[in-house]
Image (tube, grey):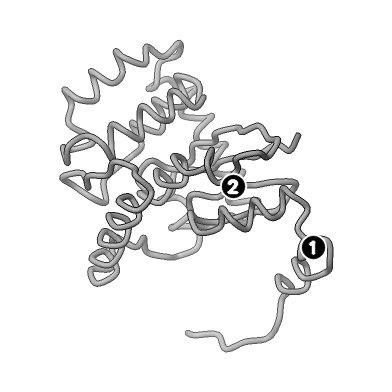
Amino acid sequence: MKHLIFTFDVISPYAWLAFERLPQALDGCSYSVTYRPIVFGALLKHHAHKGPAEIEPKRQWTFRQVSWLAHQQGTPLQTPAQHPFNSLALQRLITAAGPNRRVVEAVFRHVWAGGGADANDPARLAALRDTLAPARDPDSDAVKAELRAHTEAAIAEGLFGVPTLTCEGRHFWGLDALPMLRDALTGGTWFQGPAWNDEGAPRPGLVRR
């Protein structure tokens, strides 16, 4: 059995689609999953990069594409009233409740299958917290430190986006990487050769100032 780490922030519609698609994409494979919530904004800050929803033409394309993708795979998706938004309270709630598949799905659905409502609406947040009944206080120092540690670990591992699935030290970024991940899990011949290391090796290139 292979072990996967699913690193995510519920702010990402691609993370929601990948979460929903994962069981079908890996049908027949032997694997287990650890769900690791992080703060996507911290990755963007570390790499001095804007999120796709912060660049207006890219935002337009992103939400058109994810709506089509959701339609294609049969996953409910309604863009929340505000996006991007501060997902910190939701990521802390997941951490406090224990990031198993049931908890993660409930929070993803709160954001992306909530009828287009504000993900940070206080009444909705309170209702979600009551439903999940976390064993720990999401606002506690311990939970905050744990989420921060998850995020710092992701940065140290070289992650730059969500969702990222990690298997045996290899990182697979994005919804469209699920077929590649499946090939790795099932012993694909490409993964048995040197291509992974060769194609990821540093090489000279133009540096923009």
Question: Which secondary structure, mark 1?
Answer: helix
| Residue position marked by numbered label 1 in the rendering | 189
| Residue position marked by numbered label 2 in the rendering | 165
Query: Where is residue 7 drawn, in percent x and y?
Result: 54, 43
Identity of the residue furthest to the bottom in this view: 206
Residue at 40 percent of width and 15 percent of height: 137
Residue at 78 percent of width and 73 percent of height: 198
Query: Where is residue 39 drawn, in percent x and y?
Result: 44, 43
How far apart in space, not on screen, are marks 1 and 2 (Cα)? 20 Å
Question: Which secondary structure, mark 2?
Answer: strand
Which of the image's four quarters has the N terminus?
top right
Q: Is residue 96 above or below residue 60?
A: above
Query: Where is residue 73 drawn, in percent x and y?
Result: 38, 49
Please state if 161 lies on the left or on the right of 107 as rendered. right
Q: Is residue 29 above or below residue 192?
A: above
Look at label 2 and name its amino acid: Leu
Residue at 56 percent of width and 53 percent of height: 178
Label 1 neighbour load within 10 Å: few <14, some 14-19, many 20+:
few
